Amino acid sequence: MVRSKINILIIDYKKTLILLQRVIRGLLNMLEYIPGFRSGKKFKMFISTIYYILTLLMFTGGFGYGLFFLAAPFLGFSFIDIFKHKKRSMSLKKPLLSFVVSLLILSIAVVMIPNVESTSVSGTDKTQVAEVTQKPTDEPTQTLEPSIDRADKSNEVLLGGVTEEPTNTQEQNLVTEPSGKPSEKLTEDPPKSVTNPTSIPINTNSRFEVHFIDVGQGDASLVLCDGESMLIDGGTSKSSNVIYTYLKKQSIDKLNYIVSTHPHEDHVGGLAGALNYATVDTVFSPVTSYESTAFNNFLKYLNIQNVSITVPKAGETFKLGSATVQILGPVRYDNDVNNNSIVLRITYGDTSFLFTGDAEREEEQDILEQGYDLDTTVLKVGHHGGETSTTYLFLREVMPEYAVISVGRNNQYGHPHENTLSRLRDADIKTYRTDMQGDIICTSNGKTVSFTVMRNENANTLSPVSKLTPTPAPTGKPTVTTMPHATATPTVKPTQAPANSNTGSHNKDTDIKYILNTSTKKFHYPTCHSVGRMSENNKQEWLHTRDELINQGYEPCGNCKP
């Protein structure tokens, strides 16, 4: 039994040895087809072995290097064989084929070898760009007042005596922590992966303006930069004629962008007037449909121009002339339409402008958590100065030098709220208001900004709503507040309404030229007794010409005969 097993092992060993010998013999036979081994001469075989080992080493440094080292000798040998084929009595076809194949492999190798110099330079540039665009996360942040610390608890008593909490615990659990655990995102460091637009050199011929158009209780801002234009909101439907006329006076019959921050009537209503006068290239809106007459009118005029709505994503950027526009929100969609407002920041040189639509506390918190660069020169105050917008935490990050509140005079909402005005006062922010000062034009030269207001330059814009003082009679010229290196000039000048002998009581010095009744389509002098009986919902101020009113279907009042 043992012997039989030993015999089987011996037989298996012999079979394995025979198989190994056949493999070795096969490999040796293959050498006859490998250049350098075909002659069988030991010297040539030794040289060839070294050559192939070096070739393998070159492949480890890069495929292009290996191919080059492999093909170069064959190209040389085939080139020599082409000239010696007659002497060697060999066919020309074989060396020509070898030459072409070697040349092709060599060309591929040259293409695949990386350019070391350009690679190093490119790498350096990328490093420099990264250093410029990345905002250090440990950079100290300016505070509103020495007494305000970013580590303060959210339920502290704010300056001005207003107690504010970012959101209650239940809201945090619903919005930011589905697991039900208390949210601690207010104290987290912002993500380090966010890339923010940086300031760029401005051409000396460049020009940048933001026109905050007085549309009453609503929002409308026209941004102009280097011949390009963007309209952000358009006020209510009653403001359509105001937007139409404003674009006409600016000779803007083409808008590069329209931004409808959200579909509420006091923001989207007047955009129909803009589309009646001007064409548009790109339209941004957080939604493509909304059940309201104002939004459907907006869609109707977009369809006439065959323009569709683009829903932007947070973090996207685009150019407006030499300015850079970055979309900051909405980060996510909320049941509250205000918290779906498009929030955008425009960077022009060293100056920046933040437009927040009607974003409230929740959307402001979402944006804070994204880690964007929010440092801003001019802030368009959110939601017309409503209490639930421009919160303490958000304002502390934005730290604007100037603020603009677009709001209607004696509006039913009590905007701007005293708590918001208190926060702006405590932060020592120079504030402008359309209800007190009319159209507001901000001009930037890339370093500083200046403001032009249509009236009431020295108004106490941070006074409580209930203590507004009457607007003094203007001098007939716009008021200009000038900062260093700025040359802002007004583009819409109020003119005086002619005195009419039939009115007797008409005040020639008033800056409001006519009062419109949007219901009856009649226009009146401000001193007409019919104005006092007019419903506030139907009343609208008009600063422009009589002919423009008539062209838009309005008729003069039969009593004051304007």
Image (cartoon, rainbow, N blue to C red):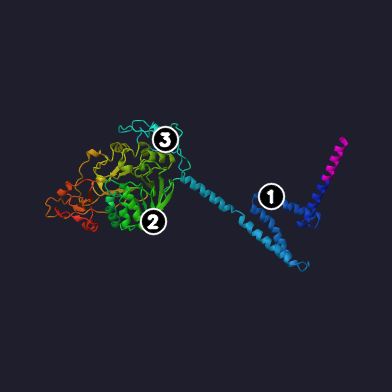
Foreground label between 2 and 1: 2
Disc 3 from disc 2: Cα separation: 37 Å
Q: Specify the principal SS of the magenta part.
A: helix
Q: Identify the disc placed on residue 57.
A: 1
Please indicate whether residue 474 sits to the left or right of residue 178 in the image: left
**Lower position in the chain sequence, tag 3 or tag 1:** 1
**Lower position in the chain sequence, tag 3 or tag 2:** 3
* Residue at point 20%, 43% (across, down): 470
Does 46 appear in magenta? no
Local crowd at mark 2 within 10 Å, few (<14), some, or many (≥20)? some
Mark 3 in CB contact with mark 2 (< 8 angstroms)? no
Three-letter code, disc 3 = Leu
* Residue at point 71%, 65% (across, down): 96
Disc count in the image? 3
Which stretch is magenta? 1-15
Please indicate whether residue 64 sits to the left or right of residue 186 in the image: right
Please indicate whether residue 97 sits to the left or right of residue 362 in the image: right
